[in-house]
Image (cartoon, rainbow, N blue to C red):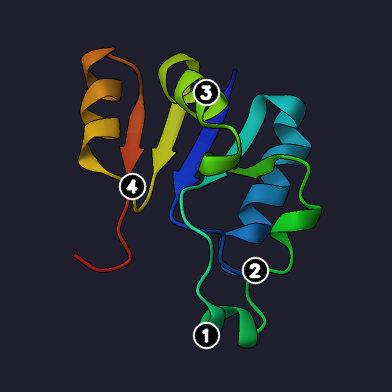
C-alpha cells in the first residue's frame, strides 16, 4: 500500500506520526510539503527534521513526482493544499482524507 501525506509543511506534531508510518510502510510512505516554512516558525525550532526524513520532499523540488503520487497512491492524506488537487484525487475514486487544524 502506498500512502502519501501532503500538506503545507511538516510540523513537530506531524513528524512522529510520519516516522511511524515510514517504519510501517518503508518506501511506500511519502510526505510532500507544498511550502517552505516561514522564518518565524524556523526560529521556533520547527522545520529542522524534514531535511533528515528520507520520506519527505518539497513539491517544488519534484513537481512530477508529487503529481504522480497524488494520482497513483493507494491512500492520500491532505492537509493545507489547493482544492484542485483534492478534486482530481476524488475524481479517481481513491481513498482520500482531508484534515484541518481549524475549520
Q: Which mark is residue 64?
A: 3
Contact flag, marks 1 and 3 (Cβ < 8 Å): no
Question: Element under label 1?
Answer: helix
**Mark 2 / mark 3, whichever is N-terminal:** 2
Q: Position of residue 51 (x, y in %)?
A: 75, 56
Question: Element under label 3?
Answer: helix
- Visible in this render: residue 31? yes
- Visible in this render: residue 74? no
**Mark 2 / mark 1, whichever is N-terminal:** 1
Q: In what quadrant of the picture does the N terminus appear?
A: top right
**Mark 1 / mark 3, whichever is N-terminal:** 1
Q: In what quadrant of the picture does the C terminus appear?
A: bottom left
Q: Is residue 16 left or right of residue 91?
A: right
**Mark 3 / mark 4, whichever is N-terminal:** 3
How many residues crowd mark 1 within 10 Å: few (<14), some (14–19), many (20+)?
A: few
Q: Position of residue 47 (x, y in %)?
A: 64, 68
| Identity of the residue drawn at 46% across and 49% down | 34
Q: Is residue 85 above or below residue 36?
A: above
Q: Is residue 33 above or below residue 21?
A: below
The residue that label 4 is drawn on is 81
Query: What is the CA distance from the residue labelled 1 to the residue labelled 3?
Result: 29 Å
Q: Which mark is residue 40?
A: 1
- Viewer-nearest of labels 4 and 1? 1
Query: What is the CA distance from the residue labelled 3 to the residue labelled 4?
Result: 16 Å
Q: Position of residue 43 (x, y in %)?
A: 63, 87
The residue that label 2 is drawn on is 47
Query: What is the CA distance from the residue labelled 2 to the residue labelled 1?
Result: 11 Å
Contact flag, marks 2 and 3 (Cβ < 8 Å): no
Quadrant in which residue 61 is drawn: top right
Question: Element under label 4?
Answer: loop
Q: Which mark is residue 2?
A: none
Amino acid at each position: 500500500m502506498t500512502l502519501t501525506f501532503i500538506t503545507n509543511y511538516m510540523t513537530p506534531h506531524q513528524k512522529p506520526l510520519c516516522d511511524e508510518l515510514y517504519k510501517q510502510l518503508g518506501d511506500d510512505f511519502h510526505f510532500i510539503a507544498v511550502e517552505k516554512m516561514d522564518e518565524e516558525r524556523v526560529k521556533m525550532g520547527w522545520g529542522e527534521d524534514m531535511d533528515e526524513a528520507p520520506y519527505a520532499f518539497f513539491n517544488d523540488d519534484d513537481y512530477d513526482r508529487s503529481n504522480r503520487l497524488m494520482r497513483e497512491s493507494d491512500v492520500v492524506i491532505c492537509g493545507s493544499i489547493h482544492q484542485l488537487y483534492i478534486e482530481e484525487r476524488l475524481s479517481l475514486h481513491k481513498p482520500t482524507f482531508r484534515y484541518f487544524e481549524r475549520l
